[in-house]
Amino acid sequence: GALASYYYGIVLTGCNFTGNEATGPGGGVFNDNSAATVTTCLFQENASDIGGGIYNSNSIVDVSDSTFESNSATTLDLFSGGGGMHNYVSAISMTSCTFNNNQAQSGGAVECFFTNASIQNSIFTNNVAQVRGGGFVCTISDVDLVDTVLENNIAAEGDGFYVGGQTTLNFEGTNSTD
């Protein structure tokens, strides 16, 4: 991938991550035990096994006003997807983000596993998961969706979202036409 952060804090503002590839996690950005702030960034056409745009593990991440478009996660493992973003044992806040045309086996746009996530004023459109959660998939996670739109996402199970075991999903002002 383009950027890897281990045990550090990073601040990304106005960055473009386009056309990057990784044979492991994080085609655009890889965060492990890190704190990251991402503002007004573009993640486009990045690819990796897990988390095509961004991969977060044991991290605290705040993403705002950013776009994730045409990213892909290529692994066939159902717990290792997230075309736009994969989150494992992390705390994620997303505000005013757009996820469009991302794809993965599971979680076309976003996958959360053992993660607390707050998603506000965001748009998930035209994302594809071959199996679960075209928009996003959450397993053993707590997720709040506030004023978020899910449209035209596709998956074999859960076009807009797929909620796995031991997950709490709270909706407020969210529209889904999937």
Image (tube, helix red, strand yellow):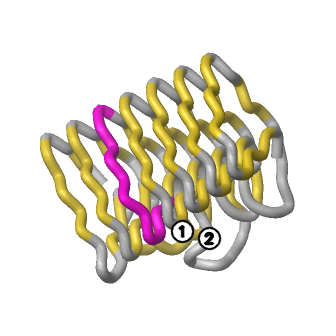
Where is residue 158? Give x, y as percent.
Answer: 36, 68
User: Does the magenta segment cover residue 114?
Assistant: yes
Q: Quadrant of residue 14?
A: top right
Residue beneath disc 1: 106
* Vertical comparison of 64 with 80: above or below: above
Residue 72 vertical placement versus 50 (above, below): above
In magenta, the rendered stretch is: 111-121
Q: Which residue is mark 2?
A: 80
* Picture coordinates of residue 144, whole percent (x, y): 25, 52
Q: Main secondary structure of the magenta part?
A: strand
Q: Secondary structure at mark 2?
A: loop
Q: Nearer the viewer, mark 1 or mark 2?
A: 2
Q: Position of residue 154 (x, y in %)?
A: 45, 59
Q: CA distance from mark 1 to mark 2?
A: 7 Å
State the residue at coordinates (86%, 61%).
Answer: 23
Q: Quadrant of the C terminus?
A: bottom left
Seen at 43% across and 58% down, the residue is 136
Going by the image, does 140 lie left or right of 39?
left
Q: Residues within 10 Å of mark 1 (few under 14, many from 20)?
A: many
Q: Is residue 163 visible?
A: yes
Left/right placement of residue 61 relative to residue 12 reads left
Nearest the camera: 123 or 146? Answer: 146
- Name which residue type carries label 2: Ser
Of the pair 70 and 110, the residue shown nearer to us: 110
Quarter occupied by residue 46: top right
Callout 2 crowding tier (Cα within 10 Å): few <14, some 14–19, many ≥20: many
Q: Residue at x 17, y 52 (%)?
A: 171
Image point (32%, 47%), residue name: 118
Q: What is the residue that sits farthest to the bottom in this orientation?
A: 165
Q: Mark 2 or mark 1, which is nearer the start of the sequence?
A: 2
Place of residue 175 in the rendered image (x, y in percent of width and height, measured from the top left): 20, 44
